Image: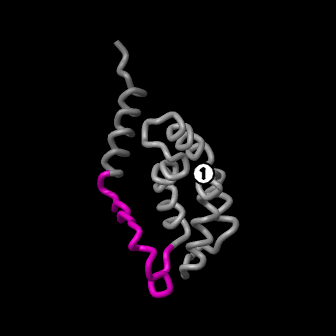
Amino acid sequence: MKFPIVTVSLVSAALMFVLWDQAREQPEVVDAKRFTSLAENPVQLSTAVGWIVTQVPSLCEDATGQPPGSRAYTRCVAQAETRTSTCRRAMYDQFPSIVASEAVFRDLSITLINCLVPDALG
């Protein structure tokens, strides 16, 4: 019987990746309070966009007026998930890399929400 070199190599690589992932520093959890004093404590655009994207379930609940699990809510979340990549790219092209004011954060939030969940504000 031949020694399974390829299998051993793939399993070893997967194990090394898991160990590396566990050992690296985990990003800090971001909540809404992080965006209250942006003039004194600016935030990277990617952090703000990431946090807004995590708000999609709540936005869809507000936009549809339906609870989680309903057909309209589920469709809203699914559609937002399909738009996420395109919307992120648009925000990175449209806004500065550092969000240092409440006005920029507000504009970013409204623009991104309108992109992800077009019926949320209208």
Left/right of residue 57 with respect to residue 88 in the rendered view: left
Decide: is 22 above or below 33: above
Q: Quadrant of residue 104?
A: bottom right
Left/right of residue 87 with respect to residue 68 in the rendered view: right
Decide: is 77 above or below 48: above
SS at circle 1? loop
**Magenta-tinted stretch:** 22-43
Decide: is 28 above or below 73: below
Whole-percent x, y for residue 93 in the image:
69, 65
State which quarter of the image contains the C terminus: bottom right
**In the orientation shown, which residue stands out farthest toward the top?**
1
Q: Is residue 34 magenta?
A: yes
Whole-percent x, y for residue 5 in the image:
39, 27
Q: 8 or 81, which is in the foreground? A: 81
The residue to which callout 1 is attached is 117
Q: Residue at x 36, y 33 (%)?
A: 11
Q: Amino acid at mark 1?
A: Val
Q: Is residue 76 magenta?
A: no
State which quarter of the image contains the N terminus: top left
